[in-house]
């Protein structure tokens, strides 16, 4: 019983069904957030890839970070 989330109430019906609904909601939310992150990262990548100055700065910065480690 201590492993059940507090929002699952055995008095309101099947604990298994409530758990599955909670899991489904969590999966939908996680997929939505991750999809937005991927789409945003792709847009930013396309924007920055077309700028030669940014590519030079990125290479220099990453090289500096790798050397500092």
Image (cartoon, rainbow, N blue to C red):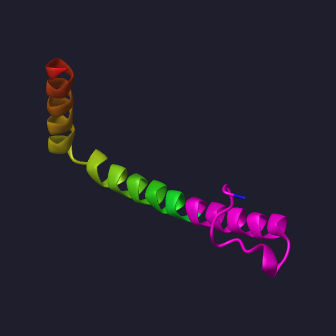
**Percent of width and height locating residue 38:** 47, 54
Task: Find residue 6 and report its horizontal and vertical position in percent.
Answer: 62, 69
User: In the displayed structure, would residue 12 be above or below residue 64?
Assistant: below
Q: Residue drawn 20% across and 37% down?
A: 58
Vertical relation: 12 (above or below) 6: below
Q: Residue at x 66, y 57 (%)?
A: 2
Main secondary structure type of the part rendered in magenta: helix
The relative height of residue 48 versus residue 55 in the rendered view (above or below) is: below
Q: Residue at x 84, y 77 (%)?
A: 13
Residue 24 x, y percent position in the rendering: 71, 65
**Residue at the extreme right of the image, as rendered:** 14
Look at the image and give the residue range highlighted in magenta.
2-31
Would residue 7 be counted in the magenta stretch?
yes
Residue 23 painted magenta: yes
Viewport quadrant of the C terminus = top left
Q: Residue furthest bottom?
A: 12
Is 51 placed left or right of 47 in the picture? left
> Is 32 located above or below residue 64 in the figure?
below
Which quadrant of the view contains residue 29?
bottom right
Q: Nearer the viewer, residue 2 or 40?
A: 2
Q: Quadrant of the N terminus?
A: bottom right
Depth check, front residue: 66 or 5: 5
Q: In which quarter of the image is residue 55?
A: top left
Residue 66: image location, x then y, percent: 21, 22
Q: Nearer the viewer, residue 10 or 68?
A: 10
Identified at 42% across, 53% down, the residue is 42
Residue 39 located left or right of residue 54:
right
């Amino acid at each position: 019983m201590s492993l059940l989330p507090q929002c699952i109430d055995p008095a309101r019906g099947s604990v298994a069904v409530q758990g599955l609904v909670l899991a489904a909601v969590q999966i939908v939310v996680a997929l939505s957030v991750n999809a937005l992150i991927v789409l945003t990262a792709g847009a930013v990548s396309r924007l920055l890839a077309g700028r030669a100055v940014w590519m030079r700065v990125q290479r220099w910065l990453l090289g500096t970070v790798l050397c500092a480690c």
